[in-house]
């Protein structure tokens, strides 16, 4: 069933409200998560000479912004939840853009990489191609997008106060290719566990020269 503009607005408001209400708990609960595997996956595919300009899409309280900065790169955070954006601004000293994922205002061809760690799954499926297209446009030619999402069986809906869409690898590939990306690699997380104990699908994509015409 197609979501109306009012439905989409309600999804954004409720999901961001959940993160704002739980901002301190979210920061404390994720502060020590090790996502170096994901950061390394993005950085090893970037072309040219560092420092690289990175958009942390859904930066939360700014943990990964600090790591990109520590590694010598120029990181910009994008976060929809006001409380988390304020934390990121305070803790990282990086530039933070408070924008929700369905109402983006991004500069064209500005970033070497987009780091979308545990964020794109919040985009309703009917809006995903449009949002991926906006990220495609903000990447420089040959730029790279990293994504990590909780995997599923291509269902979507509410889960503990947040809206999410949960794709398997095949469907995620279709979505990314349709938006003009070429796959570089994928893996499942956490590492070293049986597949059934790896709920996260991570993948790395290069911006193609032109968006695909796939339906």
Image: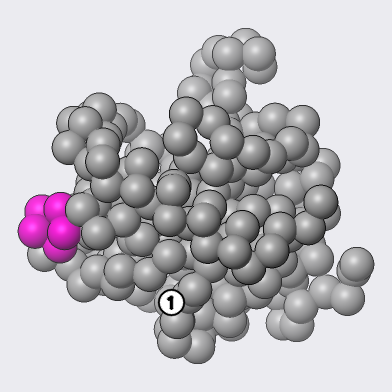
The quadrant of the picture occupied by the C terminus is: bottom right
Q: Is residue 66 magenta?
A: no
State how many labels appear: 1
What residue is rendered at 26% in x and 41% in y? 21
Quick check: can you spot residue 146? no
Question: 208 or 162: nearer the eye?
Answer: 162
What residue is rendered at 64% in x and 38% in y? 157
What residue is rendered at 36% in x and 61% in y? 80
Q: Which residue is mark 1?
A: 111
* Span shown in magenta: 86-91
- Is 72 left or right of 50, judged from the image as shown? left
Judged by its main secondary structure, the magenta piece is helix
Q: Residue furthest front?
A: 6
Residue 132 x, y percent position in the rendering: 63, 67
Residue 131 in the image: above or below residue 14: below
Question: 52 or 25: nearer the eye?
Answer: 25
For the residue carrying disc 1, how many other residues have a C-alpha within 10 Å: few (<14), some (14-19), or many (20+)? Answer: many
């Amino acid at each position: 069933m197609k979501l109306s503009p009012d439905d989409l607005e309600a999804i954004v408001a409720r999901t961001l409200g959940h993160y704002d209400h739980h901002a301190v708990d979210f920061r404390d609960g994720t502060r020590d998560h090790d996502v170096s595997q994901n950061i390394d996956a993005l950085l090893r595919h970037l072309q040219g000479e560092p420092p690289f300009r990175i958009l942390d899409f859904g930066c939360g309280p700014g943990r990964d912004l600090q790591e990109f900065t520590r590694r010598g790169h120029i990181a910009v955070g994008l976060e929809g939840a006001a409380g988390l954006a304020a934390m990121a601004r305070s803790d990282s000293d990086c530039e933070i853009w408070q924008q929700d994922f369905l109402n983006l205002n991004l500069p064209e061809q500005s970033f070497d990489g987009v780091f979308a760690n545990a964020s794109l799954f919040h985009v309703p499926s009917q809006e995903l191609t449009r949002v991926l297209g906006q990220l495609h446009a903000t990447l420089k030619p040959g730029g790279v997008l990293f994504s990590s999402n909780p995997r599923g069986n291509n269902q979507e809906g509410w889960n503990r106060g947040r809206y999410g869409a949960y794709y398997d690898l095949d469907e995620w590939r279709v979505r990314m290719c349709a938006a003009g990306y070429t796959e570089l690699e994928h893996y499942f997380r956490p590492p070293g566990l049986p597949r059934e104990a790896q709920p996260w699908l991570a993948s790395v994509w290069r911006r193609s020269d032109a968006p695909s015409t796939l339906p």
